[in-house]
Structure formats: structure tokens, C-alpha cells
Image: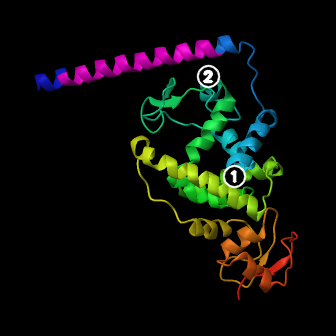
Amino acid sequence: MKYKLLFSLLIIILGSCTSRKYSKNNRQIEKQATKSNPDYTAYSTLSYIDAFKTVAIEEMNLYGIPASIILAQGILESGSGNSSLAKYANNHFGVKCTSDWKGKGYYKDDDQQNDCFRVYKDARESYKDHSEFLKRKRYSFLFELDKNDYVNWAHGLKQAGYATNPQYPNLLINLINKYKLHQYDSPETEREKILREDRVFTEINENIPLEKQKFKPVDVPDAKKIIAGAETSKNNSTGSVTGKKFHTVQSGDTLFNISKRYNLTVDELKALNNLFDVGIKIGQQLQVVK
């Protein structure tokens, strides 16, 4: 009993020392951040969007992640840029330290006590690292989606394990609709999509050997299941889902993503509807079953 008590006291003392170490580390980072930006002004959600929409669009055009998704995640994860993690560590997406992270860490209780979060030199670096973070095998299926397909991206992020909150997709979609973040998304031609996918998947494949060292391996979701699952949550934004005869074109739809949704080729979809080009209109009814 005596030895158990001593062991327990030792654990408490060591834990206390560790906590003091992390607190001291955080105070240094906070002091430096305050010195660098002594006139810090809190963001409103609208001013946050205005401040970061440009970098979100840049990342969308580079990798195909919808700008609306990037902005919605930033708003949600950082409290519109006002969380302590965003204010002091310039970390707007809650990205944690990994074994290869060479930068500073900011410590907060999250999944575990004193989880280490990455510290960036500025918010722009956080946005860029967010894209790099998603270029992993577990998220790879998302890059097959169109870069303005924010509904499927929202559901896919949850499916791939980005967040544990079961309402995460709805939270993102509601933010996008409330602040009209989809206005910053843009479509891409089928050729542009193919070229972008080739480039991004080459980078993802190059990173896979390093992922085993940095991240716990996970099963990769099936992109078709994500798309089918997300369709049921669009709340009448489409007139049908897989198994029905017609699809009602909505904002952001292209022949490419519609064809993938219903397991058709673009040529088959065009032939079913006597289309001679790739132009479709919102509200248009397209036959999707042969």
C-alpha cells in the first residue's frame, strides 16, 4: 500500500510538471503573437470571410477543394478566427502536430489532455497546410468530386473521419447556405478536372509511404457511397437519387458529376437526353436510367 501511494504521488508530480511546461510554452507563444499583432481586432463572420476568401479560392483552384468548404471549416473550427488557437497559433483548422512536424506546438485539451496543435507564422500558412493535410489516402476519394460539389465534400469529410460530430456535414452546409459561400466556388470542365485529378493523385500517391509514419492507417471510404448518402440529405435540392428515372439539375451540377452519381458515362447521359454539348440548366430534368 505504501509503494502504491508513493507511485501515485510520483505520477501526480510528473503530471503537474508537464502541465507547467506546456503552460509556459503557451504563454511564450501568446506573448510573441501579441507582440507581433498588438492591435488585434476580433473578426465577425463576415469580416472573416472577406479576409480569407482569396486564399480559399486559390487552394480550391490548386487542389479542387471547394472554397465554400474551406471557408466553412475555417469559420467552424476557429470560431470565425477568434479562438485562442487561431489568435495565438494562427491555426484555423485544428490541425495537430505529427511526428514530422518541425514547427512549434500549442497545447490544449482535446481528444487527450495537452494535445499538441501546430503553430503557423500566419493564417495563410494554416490554410495552405489544411490542403496538404487533406492530400492523404483517407481523403483521396473526395478529390474525385467536382470542385464546386460542396454537399458531397461535407458528407465525405465526416465519412473519412475529419470530425466526430454526427452533425458536422449539416453544420458546414448550413454555414455555406447562410453566408452564400458557394458564390466563391467555380465549376471546371471535364478536361480541367482530369488534369487536376492527375496532378493531385500523383501527389497523394507520393505521400502514402510517409503516411504510415505520421498517421494511423484507416479504411478509405467508397466515393460512390459518399455521393449516394449525401444525395438523401439535399432536402429536395434534387428531384431524384440513384434508382429513380430522372434527376433535376441544381446549382453546381455538371454532366460529369451527374453521370458518376448514377453510374453512367458522360456520353451515355448525353445520349439518353439527346444532348449535343455539355451545357445544362438549373431545373432541367435529365433521364438517368437506361
Within the image, what quadrant is residue 201 found in? bottom right
Asked if residue 190 can be seen in this view, the reply is: yes
Location of residue 144 in the rendering, given as x and y in whole percent from the top left corner: 63, 61
Magenta segment boundaries in residue numbering: 7-33
Q: Nearer the viewer, residue 259 or 156?
A: 259
What SS does tag 1 mark? loop
Q: Is residue 77 magenta?
A: no
Label the magenta part by its dominant secondary structure: helix
Q: Which residue is depicted at the point 42% across and 31% down? A: 113
Q: Image quadrant for the N terminus?
A: top left
Label annotation for residue 64: 1
Which amino acid is tagged 2?
A: Tyr
Q: CA distance from mark 1 to mark 2?
A: 29 Å
Q: Which residue is depicted at the point 30% across and 20% down? A: 14
Q: Residues within 10 Å of mark 2 (few under 14, many from 20)?
A: many
What SS does tag 2 mark? helix
Q: Which residue is depicted at the point 29% across and 22% down? A: 12
Within the image, what quadrant is residue 22 found in? top left
According to the picture, the residue beneath numbered tag 2 turns out to be: 88
Location of residue 97 in the rendering, given as x and y in whole percent from the top left corner: 48, 33
Q: Is residue 283 above or below residue 51?
A: below
